[in-house]
Structures are given as structure tokens and as C-alpha cells.
Image: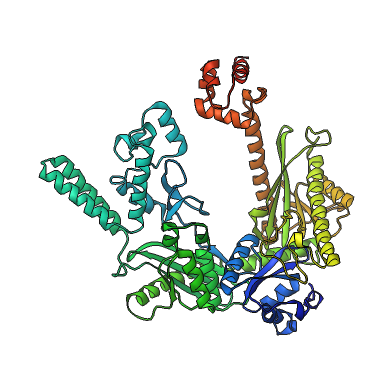
């Protein structure tokens, strides 16, 4: 625990301008990001008597070891930079919004030459337009199936599309007229894109014009006595109406709005949002928030709007307008309402109103959203009742069993995987506060002393522990050197550091991936593996990291230098956590090993062709579609491929016939 007085900057060094500040711990990791209208006044609040601080704030300032700030021109810029840094650093003391489930979207890949409509989950990708989120994936597929009658756009995977193009025959959807089959040239790429854009317009809420267009065509077909065509158009109109009616009308004035609700207590909260477009509910989404910082409901709403609309800064045009609606209805106004409104208006490219609904249909809809939030919080508490308690209990039991000075808040576990000594791989998984932190996972390819792999698992374990902690020492030394140079020079302009604690907003941040030491290292195995890991730590002079091993057969916990294992009860939460950590390391090691083995076993005969690198090899296989077709090709056919010459073509043919 650090004393905030040891790193408190001088008051005269801190500007009174708007800006964003970062607190870092002793290892350089950002633990908290905040913004301020007046940096000097805001930071002074953190350096008062710690007894007067809120418990969560006190934990943050005593965990931190330094503070730095960046001055910006306006409060709106501070809002945007704060969001960017929170996304970049994922600080442990900032409020975190976790989706209460993985929501599916209807996604249209406009970035591809031939766009595709499909169900997508997870992080949004650039060049893809999203509609939703939907409560269930089947709802998307049902809607899409209806609309393919009118908008027969591509829905197949890249592999299916490629095979259809090579064979000259479309897939089943092409035969039943639910795909316009651009793969075989039944429609041009440009005409297909126009069809996709019409589909996007319909999904965005512009439904009336398509119904009018089809109605007019139906009437014209009937007037010309083309009754079969008229009947088909009639069915298309009915399909459009059924797809439209799936979204209930909640606001009669074709309103575009996002309606938020918030329910919670001092420790956690549930957030729900209904996305209303054209007066209809187009999607619903929810989050569970752990309040790891002292924060009001208004500040929580401000962070929520950053979370929801921050990604809209990366898109433009219709996508931005669809992502940020004209109205944002919230349960409590954010403290910096004017700045938030200006920021959202800048993202949308038009005015955005942020307000609390007071009466009428919008207030009733907000009440409905709140009921959903209350239900989500109840379900969350039912599912995770005691989860925080059991995690704390597990860490406390491990601390007591291994006689540690403090609870192991960061646990790293290592495992080795191979097939009879080949393709040796090692995994490093990280658990923080009892939860997996997958962004910190690392994998290693075991080299061995002679470069052909380790002799056995103990040598492999020694190597991976040595490599990991060598990187830790190097990253720590690099960080210390940068800080020392900055202190001696009064600021390093090239590194973005300015006098005092100020840093430039665009200062390059070196990713010190191994700079954070674990509280506990767990190895998969018994005394031999533990001894190998201990020897590696001793050789590097690492003395402040605890070590143990978990043997699979009897689930015994081994510590260095002990003749007998530590036995934890089978029902122990501590043992359960160690088992989860070990099993996750085992899973990750096997995954990496299989990936290496698969890559090694599928090495192409083209790898040894002189002058044929990865790029030209890819061009060849793409042109011919398969190695079998390439083998059947002549020298002249290969030489005609872009980037190939006669000599290279002759070498390829010779290699394939060898």
C-alpha cells in the first residue's frame, strides 16, 4: 500500500485547464482514468487525508504509485479522451459495463466486394453495418428468411461462395430464388450491392417506400394480365409486412430514440436500453455494472453513454446516424449534460437531445425498460448470489494454505503440451481477482537448449518460467529507465512526457506485456515441475513471487522444498479455484499445441520452391482453387498468373512432380 503523499504533485505543477488524468500502480499499470473541468481542483480531492476518502477511492489512491495528466482544449475533448483511455487500459478501478448476455446482431458486411448478411456476436468490425441487437438468434434468421424473398442477397459463407463460383452452380438458395447468385454471374456485383443497400435501408426503418414500390409493380403486372407475377409480388408485400410487424409499434410519431433505465444499489446495477427506430423497438440490450469506484447515478449514466456510443466515432454517414439517434432518454441526467450533448451531436452529425422523459408514451416506455432492468438485476443476483463472496473466500483459503502475506490477486498458471516430444508448446493463463483475464494469456513455443525442443517437461517448464520472468525484468528495467531519464532531464519530449506529471495525449504507450508480476505462480505438475520452476526463479533472483504446483492424480498442492503436499479439502473454494486455473492452462496449452501441429503437418510442397514466397504462393492457390488443380496445370498456365515468371513456373511444376 502506497502513501499518496509520496507521489503527490506540487499544486503549482497542475494546470487549471480541462483534462484527463491517469493513476498508475508501482508496475506502471493504469488503475484509474478520470476527466476534469479543472485538473488542479479535481486532483486535490484525491490527496486529502485518506481517512476522509470513500473506501473505494482510498483503495485506489493507496494502490496507485503515480499520477499523470493530459491537458485538452475543451470539456468535450476530455470526455472523448477519457473514453479512449478507458477502452485502451481497462483500469481496474473504473466502472465496468459487462453485457448480461452475448447479444446477436444482423450484420451486413459492406466492406466485402460481395456483401453478406449474417448473424454476428461479439465486438463490432469495421466496414460492417449492424442491426439489432436481438434477443435471440432465431429471431434474426426468421426475419432474414422472410426478407430474402424481396431482397435475395448473399447469406452464404466465403467457402460456399467460392466453391459455387468454381463449379459454376449456385447453392440451394440460388435455386429457390432466395439468393440472386452473384457467385455465378446471375446478377452483377454492382447490382447485388444496390440490392444490399436497399435491404439496409429497409432494416433501418425506411419500409414504406419498398411497400409502395412493390404495390405499384403488382398493379402494373395485374393490368398486363401477368397474374403469376402479380401473385408473387403480392406475397412479397405480405412478407415485408410480416417482417415489419415483428417489431411492435411503441411510439406513434416515427421516433428515433434510445431509452435507458438503471436499477441498482451501492455495489452493482443493471442497465437496460431499448433501441427505437421509426417508432418500433428494433433492439434491446442490457449490462451489469460493478461499482468499483465511488460514483453517482448521473456519472454512471455518463459512462454508460460513452460505452454505448463511443464506437460510433469510428463510422460515418448513415451508420453513425443509425448508431446515435435523435433522442437519448435517460433515467438521470449526466452532470456534464451540455458536453455530453455536444459530443453525441458531433458523432451523429446532427442535434441529439439527452433528457429525462416526463410524460406520455415515452415515460411509459421508460417505465417498461426499468421493469426489464429490475428483472435483469434479480436474475443476476440469483445466478451470482455469493459469487463475490466465494471468490474472496477462495483467495483467502489459498493465502492461508500457502502462508502468503496477502491474497493472490493475480495468479499465473503454466502447462506444457506436446505429442511424443514434438511441437512442444506452453501456456500462461492469468486470473485476476479470481476471474480469467484472457487478454493477458500468452503462449510459448519451447525451443530447448539445442533448438529442437526440451528433453522433458521439467526442462520445458524451466525454459518457459525463465523466458517469462526475463521479460518481466527487462520490461521493469525499461520502465524504470524511462522514468529515471524523465526525472534527470526534466521531461522527455520525444517520449511524450512533459514537466511534472503532464503527458501528451498522443504520447506513444509502449506495451510492457510482461511487466506485471503475479502474486502466485501455479505449475501443472508435482515436485519435479515445481523444482524446475523454483530453479528458474532463483537463477533470475526473483524472490517476491509465491510458487506452487497442482498434481492431477490426487489434486495435491506442492510447494518448493517441502517433502509433503499441502492438502486442501475437496469442497474447498480455494482448491476449486486452483483447479479452474490449472484446467484453463491445460486447455489453452492443448489449443496452442494443436494449432502448431496442424500448421506443421499441412506444410505445402510449395514451401521449398525457390523464389516462391507466401504472397506468391497464396496468389497461385487462389487462382487455381486447390493444389490438385495446380498440379494439373501446365508451365504456361502457371506463368500466366500475376507475379509468376517462366523460371518460377518451371520450378513449381518440378516440385509438384517430384
Q: Residue at x 18, y 50 (%)?
A: 216
Q: Decide if residue 558 is in sight here.
A: no
Q: Quadrant of residue 221?
A: top left
- Location of residue 382 in the rendering, given as x and y in whole percent from the top left corner: 51, 67
At x 35%, y 80%, the residue is: 359
Task: Check the image and report above or below for 326 versus 243.
Answer: below
Say which residue appears at 17% left-offset and 44% top-offset: 231
- The number of numbered badges drawn on the structure is 0
- Relative depth, front residue between 541 and 189: 189
Which residue is more in the foreground, 334 or 413?
334
Query: Where 470 falls versus 179 (above or below)?
Result: below
Against 638, residue 341 (above or below) is below
Viewed as shown, does residue 162 lie left or right of 508? left
Res. 497 visible in picture: yes
Q: Position of residue 339 (x, y in %)?
A: 53, 75
Q: Is 532 left or right of 317, judged from the image as shown?
A: right
Q: Position of residue 209 (x, y in %)?
A: 26, 55
Amino acid at each position: 500500500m502506497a502513501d499518496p503523499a509520496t507521489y503527490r504533485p506540487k499544486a503549482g505543477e497542475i494546470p487549471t485547464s480541462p483534462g484527463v488524468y491517469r493513476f498508475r500502480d508501482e508496475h506502471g499499470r493504469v488503475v484509474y482514468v478520470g476527466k476534469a473541468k479543472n485538473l488542479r481542483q479535481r486532483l486535490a480531492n484525491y490527496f486529502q487525508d485518506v481517512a476522509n476518502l470513500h473506501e473505494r477511492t482510498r483503495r485506489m489512491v493507496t494502490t496507485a504509485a503515480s499520477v499523470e495528466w493530459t491537458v485538452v482544449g475543451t470539456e468535450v475533448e476530455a470526455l472523448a479522451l477519457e473514453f479512449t483511455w478507458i477502452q485502451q487500459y481497462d483500469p481496474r478501478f473504473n466502472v465496468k459495463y459487462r453485457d448480461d448476455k452475448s447479444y446477436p446482431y444482423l450484420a451486413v458486411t459492406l466492406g466485402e466486394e460481395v456483401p453478406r448478411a449474417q448473424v454476428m456476436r461479439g465486438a463490432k468490425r469495421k466496414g460492417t453495418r449492424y442491426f439489432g441487437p436481438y434477443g435471440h438468434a432465431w429471431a434474426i434468421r426468421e426475419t432474414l428468411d422472410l426478407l430474402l424473398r424481396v431482397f435475395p442477397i448473399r447469406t452464404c459463407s466465403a467457402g460456399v461462395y467460392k466453391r459455387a463460383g468454381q463449379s459454376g452452380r449456385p447453392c440451394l438458395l440460388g435455386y429457390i430464388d432466395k439468393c440472386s447468385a452473384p457467385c455465378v454471374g446471375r446478377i452483377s456485383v454492382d447490382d447485388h450491392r444496390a440490392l444490399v443497400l436497399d435491404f439496409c435501408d429497409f432494416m433501418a426503418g425506411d419500409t414504406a417506400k419498398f411497400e409502395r414500390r412493390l404495390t405499384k409493380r403488382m398493379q402494373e403486372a395485374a393490368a398486363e394480365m401477368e397474374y403469376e407475377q402479380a401473385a408473387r409480388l403480392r406475397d412479397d408485400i405480405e412478407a415485408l409486412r410480416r417482417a415489419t410487424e415483428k417489431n411492435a409499434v411503441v411510439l406513434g410519431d416515427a421516433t428515433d430514440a434510445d431509452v435507458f433505465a438503471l436499477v441498482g444499489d451501492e455495489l452493482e446495477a443493471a442497465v437496460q436500453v431499448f433501441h427505437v427506430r421509426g417508432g418500433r423497438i428494433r433492439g434491446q440490450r442490457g449490462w451489469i455494472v460493478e461499482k468499483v469506484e465511488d460514483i453517482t447515478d448521473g456519472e454512471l449514466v455518463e459512462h454508460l453513454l460513452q460505452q454505448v456510443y463511443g464506437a460510433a466515432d469510428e463510422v460515418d454517414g448513415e451508420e453513425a446516424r443509425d448508431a446515435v439517434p435523435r433522442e437519448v432518454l435517460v433515467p438521470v441526467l449526466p452532470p456534464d449534460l451540455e458536453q455530453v450533448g455536444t459530443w453525441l451531436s458531433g458523432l451523429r452529425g446532427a442535434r441529439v437531445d439527452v433528457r429525462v422523459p416526463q410524460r406520455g408514451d415515452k415515460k411509459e416506455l421508460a417505465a417498461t425498460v426499468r421493469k426489464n432492468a429490475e428483472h435483469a438485476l434479480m436474475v443476476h443476483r440469483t445466478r451470482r448470489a455469493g459469487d463475490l463472496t466465494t471468490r474472496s473466500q477462495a483467495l483467502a483459503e489459498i493465502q492461508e494454505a500457502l502462508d502468503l502475506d496477502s491474497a493472490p490477486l493475480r495468479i499465473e498458471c503454466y502447462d506444457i503440451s506436446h505429442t511424443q516430444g514434438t511441437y512442444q508448446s506452453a501456456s500462461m493463463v492469468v486470473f485476476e481477482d479470481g476471474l480469467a483475464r484472457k487478454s493477458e494469456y500468452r503462449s510459448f513455443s519451447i525451443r530447448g537448449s539445442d533448438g529442437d525442443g526440451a528433453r522433458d517437461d521439467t526442462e520445458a517448464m524451466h525454459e518457459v518460467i525463465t523466458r517469462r520472468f526475463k521479460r518481466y525484468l527487462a520490461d521493469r528495467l525499461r520502465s524504470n529507465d524511462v522514468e529515471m531519464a524523465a526525472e534527470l532531464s526534466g521531461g522527455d519530449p520525444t517520449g511524450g512526457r512533459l514537466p511534472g506529471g503532464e503527458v501528451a495525449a498522443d504520447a506513444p504507450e509502449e506495451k510492457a506485456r510482461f511487466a506485471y508480476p503475479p502474486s502466485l505462480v501455479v505449475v501443472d505438475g508435482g515436485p519435479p515441475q515445481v523444482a524446475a520452476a523454483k530453479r528458474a526463479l532463483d537463477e533470475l533472483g526473483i524472490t517476491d513471487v509465491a510458487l506452487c504446483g497442482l498434481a492431477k492424480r490426487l489434486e495435491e498442492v506442492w510447494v518448493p522444498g517441502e517433502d509433503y503436499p499441502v492438502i486442501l479439502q475437496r469442497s474447498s473454494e480455494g482448491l476449486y479455484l486452483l483447479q479452474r486455473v490449472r484446467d484453463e492452462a491445460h486447455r489453452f496449452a492443448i489449443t496452442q499445441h494443436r494449432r502448431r501441429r496442424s500448421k506443421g503437418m499441412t506444410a505445402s510442397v510449395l514451401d521449398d520452391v525457390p523464389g516462391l514466397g507466401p504472397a506468391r504462393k497464396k496468389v497461385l492457390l487462389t487462382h487455381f482453387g486447390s493444389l490438385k488443380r495446380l498440379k494439373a496445370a501446365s508451365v504456361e498456365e502457371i506463368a500466366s498468373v500475376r507475379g509468376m515468371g517462366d523460371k518460377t513456373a518451371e520450378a513449381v511444376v518440378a516440385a509438384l512432380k517430384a
